[in-house]
Amino acid sequence: MKNYGCPIVLPTLCVLLCVGGLAQSNSILLERHGDHLSVAAPQLHFISGKAAEKLQNGSTVTYVLMLTVAPEHSKKQTLHAKFMVSYDLWEEKYSVVKVPDGNAVSRLTAATAEAWCLENLPIPVRSISERQPFMIRLECTIEEDAGKESDKASGPIFADLIEIFSRKKQEAPLRWETVAGPFRLEDLKNH
C-alpha cells in the first residue's frame, strides 16, 4: 500500500509557516507584531487536570505565567503576569482577569482562555538582537491561596499539634514548562 500524500504535506507545512511569518520550535509559536512578539503554545494545556477540577468545583485559580527570553550572548529577559481564572457552571465557560491591570474576558473555552493569557504577555523586541539566536522558556505555576491557613486566635498548644499532625501531605504545586528555540528576529515577518 503506497501513501502518496506524505511527501507533499511536510514541504507544504513549512511553506505555510514561513509565509505566515510564524516561527515554530517544539511547542512554542512566535509571531512578530511591530515592537513585540506574541507567543502561542497550542500543545501546552494548563487549564487541565487538578486545576480544571478546582475550577469546576467553584474555586478561582490564579496562574502565574513567566516567559524568559535567553539570547546566546546577552542578558536574559524575564516577563511574568498573573491571571485569575474562574469557571461559569451554567455556561460551562471560563473567565480570565489579568492581575493587577484588570483586563478581563469571559465565555471562553479552556483552550481560548489559555491562548488569551499568552496573548496578554507580549515580549518587547527592543532588547533582542535581530540576528542573535535566542531561546524561549514558558513556565506556568498556580499561586497557592494565602487564605488556606486559617487566622485563628491562639488556643491550646495541644489542639495546634493535633491539627499539624493530622494534615494530609501537601501536594507539590502544579507546574507546566516548555522550552523552544533557537529563534531569530530576522526570520520573523512583521505583521
Image (cartoon, grey):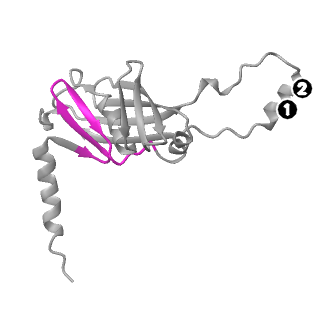
Q: To which residue does mark 2 refer?
A: 158
Which is more toward the observer, 178 or 165?
A: 165
Callout 1–callout 2 Cβ contact below 8 Å: yes
Residue 172 relative to residue 42: left or right: right
Q: Position of residue 60 (x, y in %)?
A: 52, 32
Q: Is 131 located above or below residue 7 in the figure?
A: above
Q: Position of residue 107 (x, y in %)?
A: 37, 38
Quadrant where the N terminus lies? Answer: bottom left
Magenta stretch: residue 38 in it? yes
Residue 104 lies in quadrant: top left
At label 1, the amino acid type is Ile
Q: Position of residue 74 (x, y in %)?
A: 28, 24
Q: Position of residue 12 (x, y in %)?
A: 12, 58
Q: Is 5 located above or below residue 172 in the figure?
A: below
Q: Residue at x 33, y 24 (%)?
A: 77
Quadrant where the C terminus lies? Answer: top left
Q: Residue at x 44, y 44 (%)?
A: 92
Residue at the top extreme, as displayed: 153
At label 2, the amino acid type is Phe
Disc number placed over residue 162 in the picture, else none? 1
How crowded pointer 2 is (Cα within 10 Å; few <14, some 14-19, many 20+) is rated as few
Residue range of the region highlighted in magenta in the rendering? 24-47
How crowded pointer 1 is (Cα within 10 Å; few <14, some 14-19, many 20+) is rated as few
Residue 74 relative to residue 65: left or right: left
